[in-house]
Amino acid sequence: MNVRYERCIGAELFTSGGRRILDFLSGYCVYNTGHNHPDIVYVLQQELEGYGPAMLQSHIPELAGELAQRLCERAGGRLTKAFFGSSGSEGVETAIKLCRAHTGRAGLLYAQGAFHGLTCGALSLMGDPFWRDGFGPLLPGAQGVPFGSVADLEEALSTGRFAAFIIEPVQAEAGVRVPYAEYLRAAQALCRRYRTLFVLDEVQTGMYRTGPFLAAQHFGLDPDIVILAKALSGGLIPCGAVLMSDAVYHSTYGSLKRAILHPSTFSENTLAMRAGLATMDVLEGDRLGERATILGQELRQRLTDALSEFEMVKEVRGLGLLSGIEFSAPRQLRLRIPFEAFRRIHPGMFGQVLVMHLFRDHNILAQICGNNFMVLKVAPPLVVSEAQLDEFVGAVREVVEMVHSSNVFWPEAMSLASRALNL
Ligand SMILES: Cc1ncc(COP(=O)(O)O)c(C=O)c1O
């Protein structure tokens, strides 16, 4: 996948070698508005040419107020204040501090399988040893509960130790796991009962990726804190936001003595704020959320129709334009033997070879999920066209067909694995 990209527009990437590649990864949900959306590029160019203040740290950055208002209005419910940072992880770190300050408790609950980022606090909210090993000790008091289990959640919350329950409304890297609606509503109610803050990490699912502005809105939720990043600034300037209730805000920043307790140098910088406002204009002006809803359903239907005959395809699932194709171990012996040999070499190798074929043979950029190597993630920019969706479905079908029927896939995969391991 080592090519040199020269121009990226919408859902298409053009290389120096003359290839045109379709982006179905979107930088892990960064490019909701597509690559280099002209309206966002224009706004940034204007800002730079205006020579205005960028991050003086001593004035009232009005654009930050405008963006905060816009995001909070769209989020609705109790979310009325925003803290800006530069990444999803910074948002998670911020949320941890806010929740501890608000509740006076140290404990942090998370859902197993989660991906919240790789800084020490965020990493404490991820159970997978693949990411954690070698970086401890991480934050004490962090505990995982099974995603989807109300009983386990209640048992943990009832100890009264937890400041926050932090969860992705759809677990993206865990394999695009969509919970049943009642789970998240029950989780929210339990959090209220046990005075634990209910925090949604919408770093991948927010900004209209799943249809509405927040995935929370599918489930009728009213969280205390929402974390946004990735698509917030059009994929051009790093930017993240933590939306919070008045109560959370006041308990952290609410007195003169504490007002500066959690700032950040690049927070509220003019380029990021401009990019954020322009991104919202594009997302809403072009009704990309509605597009995500309609095209997402169509895409999953087309994928299901195209792939249902193949035994290794377990499920196509998702919400809006965040979908996953889950594969399972084959039953037929002729496939099972190479599959198992392959899995012993590295559990992610099967998925990586799929990804490689999509890229090399069909000019499609996609990836498997970071915490579930048997799920191919499907997350094109929300500006993707129906023809591009068709192209993707056709390409996936051909690759999956090759996995099931040819003598090419497994020997080549084995040779790749051997090279990777220097066997
Ligand atoms: C759900 C979720 N939360 C948080 C993060 C961390 O974001 P960042 O990489 O911007 O720090 C990610 C990154 O992929 C993510 O998917």
Image (cartoon, rainbow, N blue to C red):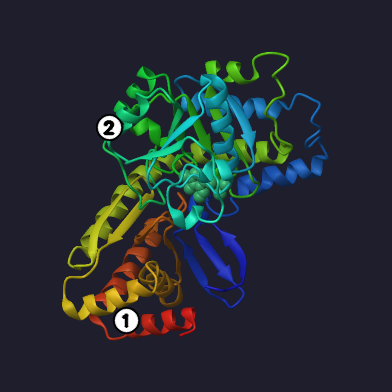
Helix, strand or loop status at disc 2: helix
Residue 164 in percent (x, y) is at 46, 29
Residue 5 in percent (x, y) is at 60, 68
Q: Quadrant of the C terminus?
A: bottom left
Mark 1 vs ligand 1: CB below 8 Å? no
Tally of numbered discs: 2
Residue 13 in percent (x, y) is at 54, 65
Residue 184 visible, this angle? no
The answer to whether residue 281 is above or below residue 367 is above
Query: Mark 2 Cα within 10 Å, few/some/many (few <14, many 20+)?
Result: some
Which residue does the image show at 81% across and 40% down from the upper left? 50
Position of 180 with respect to 127 (left or right) is: left
Q: Indicate which disc residue 410 carries.
A: 1
Mark 2 vs ligand 1: CB below 8 Å? no
Foreground: 52 or 369?
Answer: 369
Label 1 sits on what residue type? Trp
Kindly report which numbered mark, 2 or 1, lies closer to the viewer in this rendering. 2
Which residue does the image show at 29% across and 48% down from the upper left? 297
Q: Indicate which disc residue 150 carries.
A: 2
Q: Between disc 2 and disc 1, whose residue precedes?
A: 2
Residue 190 in percent (x, y) is at 33, 23
Q: CA distance from mark 2 to mark 1?
A: 42 Å
Foreground: 393 or 323?
Answer: 323
Q: Indicate which disc residue 238 carries.
A: none
Label 2 sits on what residue type? Val
The answer to whether residue 70 is above or below residue 209 is above
Query: Mark 1 Cα within 10 Å, few/some/many (few <14, many 20+)?
Result: some
Foreground: 97 or 24?
Answer: 97
Which residue does the image show at 44% across and 59% down from the upper left? 24
